[in-house]
Amino acid sequence: MKLKLILFVLLFVPVVFSQTETDFILSPCSGNEILNSKTKETDLTKILGKKNSKRVERFYAEGTERVIGTVFFSDAPKEFFIKWKDTLSFSTPEWIEIHGDSSLWSINNGIKIGTELKDLVKLNGKQFSFQGFDWDYGGYANFKNGKLDSDCYSVKLYYDYKDLFEHEWKQILGDRVISTNDPVLKKIRIYVDEIRFYFK
């Protein structure tokens, strides 16, 4: 029994501690040592394990854009999805998508899954706007030349509407621009639900 435990520690523990906190922080446009414009699916599979990667098909832009990519660590806080520019060799990432109820990933300016609206305003240094919720382009933020403004990532917001009356709820839905200083928003929790990270 002791021998089995020793073997388990020797084989498993190095894998657990091989990924540091900085591995989950992305610098705008460049990424990090593991995820960057030169990353290949085969390289990530070697590092992260074959069982933690899966090729999938997803649809975007109201179902008109078909994307073949790779999802890593599905349904886990480490999860991320890569759309590849080269889908023959599955290399050269075009973008990374991060979402979920919780995530280890963040951008080095402080944005991460779950960041709340009031904190985004502080990070941006000014108020900004976003698209109304509950349609294909709903929740996407426009940081209006603030500190968070960048073409290297996009941020999608979501909300908890449990404390809103129906007429208030309707004010933040659909194809419309919502300002972050709208009084209705103070009554509910709005937070980062998705980050799409682009390589340049």
Image (cartoon, rainbow, N blue to C red):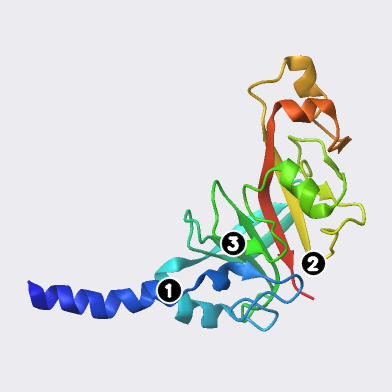
Describe the element under mark 2 as helix, strand or loop: loop
Tag 2 or tag 3, which sits nearer the N-term? 3
* Residue 67, percent from left and from top: 68, 61
Question: In front here: 167 or 114?
Answer: 114
Taking depth in this image into account, of 190 and 44 the one nearest to the observer is 190
Compare marks 3 and 1 and give the one earlier in the sequence.
1
Residue 63 visible in this rendered orientation of the protein: no
Q: Residue at x 86, y 52 (%)?
A: 143
Say whether residue 142 is left or right of residue 154.
right
Report how many numbered discs are placed on residues in the image. Answer: 3
In the depicted structure, whether residue 71 falls above or below residue 35? above
| Crowd tier of the residue under label 2, counting other residues whose Cα lies within 10 Å: few below 14, some 14–19, many 20 or above | some
Residue 77, position in %: x, y? 50, 56
Q: Are marks 3 and 1 in contact (CB under 8 Å)?
A: no
Q: Is the residue under label 1 in contact with that under label 2 (CB below 8 Å)?
A: no
Tag 2: amino acid:
Cys
In the rendered image, which residue does mark 2 sit on?
Answer: 152
Type of residue at label 3? Answer: Trp
Disc ID at residue 50: 1
Question: Disc 3 marks which residue?
Answer: 105
Q: Is residue 5 above or below residue 67?
A: below
Q: Position of residue 144 (x, y in %)?
A: 91, 52
Mark 3 vs mark 2: in front: 3
